[in-house]
Image (cartoon, helix red, strand yellow):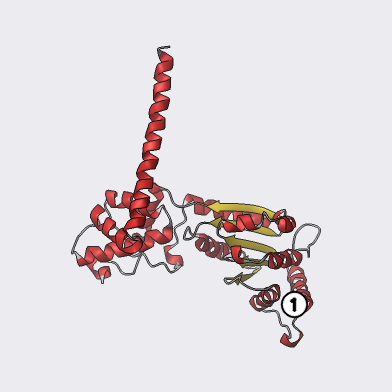
Amino acid sequence: MYLSYFGLTDNPFSIAPNPDYLFMSTRHKQALAHLTFGLQESGGFVMLTGEVGTGKTTVSRKLMQDLSDNTQTALILNPTLSALELLATVCDELNIQYSANEASLKTYTDAILSHLANNHRQGKNTVLIIDEAQHLLPEVLEQLRLLTNLETNREKLLKVVLIGQPELQQLLRRNELRQLAQRVTARYHLLPLTEQEVGQYVEHRLNVANLPQSPFTKPALALLFAISGGIPRVINLLCDRAMSLGYSLQRPFIDYQVMMSASYQVLGEDIVSQRQHTKWRRRYIISFLLALVFGVLVGGLYA
């Protein structure tokens, strides 16, 4: 209901990954650059990690859009599979024909390797993207490594992009996966948005929804950053609720108080209070350190 009230033509803060609302911050651009560079190298794996809601899926969608026309891409969104199930899924994604009656690791592997070789002869690249890769079993990761063994004198015929939460980094530190870890040619950890980027993010999404003048006040945006921690998914949830509250209260602007009320409704009072306490404690520590450094410098002048 708040769309018409604020003059919007679409919901700017839906959590659906709509590419029309794609906001590429500096860190998202760096992440994309690392992945793109890694796919151009000779190794078989590139890796992107980040906390929940930081925009890893956004980067992967952009990566898929930017891949050349001569690239065949397989996307796996549910990696909680056995090694056999994973290979079958790869065959399905790459449109590889196989007989279900003869299902075995060797049958699937031979079919995939034959397909990779055929793509290479036709001048095509093959890329496998696995989301939520922290859920992959070690034996499944080892099977993926074996798939990347097919190579020419210059490059691997299959490039694998692993996208996951920070637990993926821990997984690849396991001793039995050290060979795979050595094949990761590029890795990037995506951090949340900065305070300045949060404001730019909100403004960008409102502009796409045809609202050039943001109703969010500066104090509301400062609170939004403090409560969300700069995580885009949480920003969307808070802004959507704040605009709904603004409509119900018939407010022309989303001020600090409306944003605080929205935060309580979305996250609960305990979490909001905890994040506010963390924010002020961080500012106190920074102020204390700056004062300490200043005191040392002044003391040095009069020593």
Q: Residue at x 37, y 51 (%)?
A: 275
**Viewer-proximal residue, 70 or 182?**
182
> What's the residue at 42%, 61% (across, down)?
233
Residue at image point 32% right, 51% down: 223
Left or right, residue 95 beside residue 233 = right
Viewer can see residue 226: no
Name the quadrant containing residue 124. Answer: bottom right
Residue drawn at the location 39% of the way across and 18% of the way down: 298
Q: Quadrant of the C terminus?
A: top left
Q: Quadrant of the N terminus?
A: bottom left
Question: For residue 284, which quarter of the picture?
Answer: top left
- Residue furthest to the bottom in view is 101
Residue 235 coordinates in the image, percent (x, y): 38, 58
Q: 73 above or below 53?
A: below
For this orientation, the residue located farthest to the left is 250
Side (left or right) of 71 relative to 205: right
Pointer 1 local density, CA inside 10 Å: few below 14, some 14–19, many at least 20: many
| Relative height, residue 237 to residue 228 (above, below) | below
The amino acid on which the numbered mark 1 sits, given as a three-letter code, is: Tyr
Residue 297, quarter of the rendered image: top left
Label 1: which secondary element: helix
* Residue 115 coordinates in the image, percent (x, y): 74, 74
Which residue position holds label 1? 108
Between residue 154 and residue 31, name the one nearer to us: 31
Q: Position of residue 64 (x, y in %)?
A: 57, 65
Extreme residue in the right direction: 153
Label total for image: 1
Residue 227: tell me if it is visible: yes
- Give whichever of 23, 296 is nearer the camera: 296
In this view, 80 is above or below 297: below
